Image (spheres, helix red, strand yellow):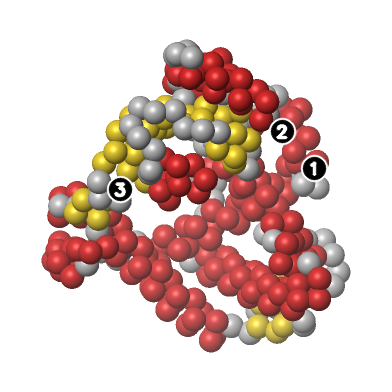
Amino acid sequence: MVKKAVVLMLLVSVFVSGTACGKKIAATVNGEPIYMEEVDKQLEQLGQQHQSLEGQQGEEYKKQFQKQILDDLIEQKLVLQEAEKEKIKVSDKEIDDWIKQAKQQFPSEQEFESKLKELNLTIEELKKNRKEQLLRQKMIEKITKDIKVTDKEVEDYYKKNKEELKEPEKVKIKWIILSEEKKAKEVLKELEEGADFAEVAKRESIDTATKESGGVLGLRSKNELPPEVAEEAFKIELNKLSELIKMQQGYAIIMVEEKQPEKQKTFDEAKEEIKNKLLSEKQSKAYQDWIEKVKKKAKIDKKV
């Protein structure tokens, strides 16, 4: 089942990439308009995520991002036009099934509708924009469907790139996350006095993803942990409580139960990873080659 966070991202994605009702045209693609409102909405999303877009220097960044956003929208429009030429279809059932799945990630129909209202998006617009996403996806799948990776390509890659095909050092870790320093100190003291880590995690941790399992995160590499936690986790002694670790979302108390050193992956361990990497690279190149040919034949008129 699609997680709520993923659904929210998709809702935002279809919102900012949908058809705008503004009258100012940013570009035309084979006679079809792309409105400036579409560009501005995506730029606004970026502005909320990047502080670098503020101030005088931020204005220069905005111009660069605006150009990139418009180029992306032009490309999306071209893919849709080609999908129409190829008679690629998206059924009402595909759209309705996705809408149903999206609604299930909210506690109630009312909350789903509130999210749409927050995004200034109607259910009809959501369906239309989702349809366009699926059309583009199907068109790209058609372009790349015959691409294959041979066993020899996988074997050759493994022989030439063993150094990058290593399983990183990992720790088997559990944690308790608390929002307030005072409470975190009380919990740490309780643990130091012998309280069971798992029981305390279930009772006190604010991390809903791990609290029910007693705070167990499992094996994690440095890149899979918050930097502050990783720094402590890879130097702490086994089965020893850490001091309080200040994190962005509060305070962590960790315990490491096992350490696994870095190791070379065998061919069998690495072959699926290699195959997926090579396939992705081939598909990306095929798409780029295809879209460049489409652009050369298209009539594109940028207004900004």
Dot 2: element: helix
Q: Please name the residue that numbered disc 1 is placed on.
A: 118
Query: What residue do we see at 49% from left, 18% from top?
Result: 191
Mark 1 crowd level (few <14, some 14–19, many ≥20, 10 Å Cα): few
Task: Say which residue appears at 32% left-offset and 43% top-offset.
Answer: 170
Query: What separation in Å lies between label 1 and label 3 (alpha carbons)?
Result: 43 Å
Tell me the element at label 1. Answer: helix
Q: Quadrant of residue 44?
A: bottom right
- The CA distance from mark 2 to mark 3 is 42 Å
Between residue 86 and residue 157, name the one nearer to us. Answer: 157
> x%, y% of residue 73?
64, 69
**Dot 3 alpha-carbon crowd within 10 angstroms: few under 14, some 14 to 19, many 20 or more:** some
- Give yes or no for contact between labels 1 and 3 (Cβ–Cβ under 8 Å): no
The answer to whether residue 257 is seen in the rendering is yes
Residue 97 visible within the image: no
The structure residue drawn at horizontal position 82% and vertical position 61%, both measured from the top left corner, is 21
Residue at image mark 3: 169
Q: Which mark is residue 112?
A: 2
| Residue closest to the eye, 192 or 292 | 192
Q: Is residue 207 left or right of residue 256?
A: right
Few, some or many C-alpha atoms within 10 Å of disc 2 (few <14, some 14-19, many ≥20)? Answer: some
Along the polypeptide, which appears first: circle 1 or circle 2? 2
Element type at mark 3: loop
**Disc 2 residue type (three-letter):** Phe
Give the CA distance from mark 1 to mark 2.
10 Å
In the image, 34 versus 106, the foreground residue is 106
Residue 268 picture location, percent across and down: 15, 50
Q: Inspect the image, locate mark 3, and give the three-letter code of the amino acid beneath it.
A: Glu
